[in-house]
């Protein structure tokens, strides 16, 4: 389980529950009723709109034959990831970046650390000089060079 957790940590436990139910060809509603839970509760969790709680996690794990604590470990890692995102408000100066450069998303929702490769490539492919300067200032020349000119 430890190896799997390393791979999926930070993912909402509901998404993994959804995947597990699909893999076993179990429908959410009947499964929820079989563990004496409301289908709406399970549906909200699998959509990531509600957190997993300990009592429900234990019921689900027992019913599916999963290791005890699996979903709560995922929940804790998910909570940690969300808190880190809240605390990590470091981002480039938005006034120097055109919103059109990131047309498919809101710039405030971009994880500038995790998505730096995509951001750098996008700006250096489609950005103007001011945007390139700002991204270079934010990430540093070394990071820009590593991403744009990877060693062969």
Image (cartoon, rainbow, N blue to C red):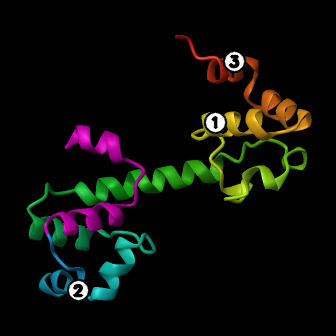
The residue wearing badge 3 is 145
- 131 or 56: nearer the viewer: 131
Q: Quadrant of residue 70?
A: bottom left
Whichever of callouts 1 and 3 sits on the residue coming sooner in the sequence is: 1
Point out residue 134 in the picture as x, y percentages from the top left corner. 85, 34
Whether the magenta-drawn stretch holds residue 146 is answered as no
Q: Which mark is residue 59?
A: none
What secondary structure is the magenta-colored segment mainly?
A: helix
Q: Quadrant of residue 131?
A: top right
Label 3: few (<14), some (14–19) or many (≥20) C-alpha neighbours in 10 Å: few
Residue at horizontal 43 percent and vertical 55 percent from the top:
78
Residue at horizontal 40 percent and vertical 50 percent from the top:
77
Looking at the rendered structure, the secondary structure element under dot 3 is helix
Label 1: few (<14), some (14–19) or many (≥20) C-alpha neighbours in 10 Å: some
Point out residue 144 in the picture as x, y percentages from the top left corner. 70, 23
* 142 vs 92: above or below: above
Looking at the rendered structure, the secondary structure element under dot 2 is helix
Which stretch is magenta? 1-24
Looking at the rendered structure, the secondary structure element under dot 1 is helix
Point out residue 83 in the picture as x, y percentages from the top left corner. 55, 53
C-alpha distance separating marks 2 and 1: 40 Å
Q: Quadrant of residue 46?
A: bottom left
The residue wearing badge 1 is 116
Question: Exactly how many numbered labels are in the figure?
Answer: 3
Whichever of callouts 2 and 1 sits on the residue coming sooner in the sequence is: 2
Quadrant in which the N terminus is drawn: top left
The residue wearing badge 2 is 29
Disc 3 and disc 2 in contact, CB within 8 angstroms: no
* 136 vs 114: above or below: above
C-alpha distance separating marks 3 and 2: 52 Å
């Amino acid at each position: 389980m430890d190896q799997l957790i390393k791979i999926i940590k930070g993912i909402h436990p509901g998404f993994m529950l959804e995947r597990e139910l699909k893999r076993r060809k179990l429908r959410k509603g009947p499964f929820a009723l079989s563990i004496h839970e409301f289908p709406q509760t399970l549906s909200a969790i699998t959509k990531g709109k509600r957190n997993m709680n300990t009592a429900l996690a234990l019921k689900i794990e027992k019913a599916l034959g999963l290791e005890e604590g699996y979903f709560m470990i995922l929940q804790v890692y998910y909570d940690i990831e969300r808190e880190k995102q809240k605390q990590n408000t470091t981002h480039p100066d938005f006034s120097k970046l055109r919103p059109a450069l990131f047309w498919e998303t809101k710039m405030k929702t971009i994880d500038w650390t995790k998505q730096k490769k995509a951001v750098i490539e996008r700006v250096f492919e489609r950005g103007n000089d001011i945007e390139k300067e700002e991204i270079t200032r934010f990430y540093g020349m070394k990071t820009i060079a590593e991403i744009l000119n990877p060693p062969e």
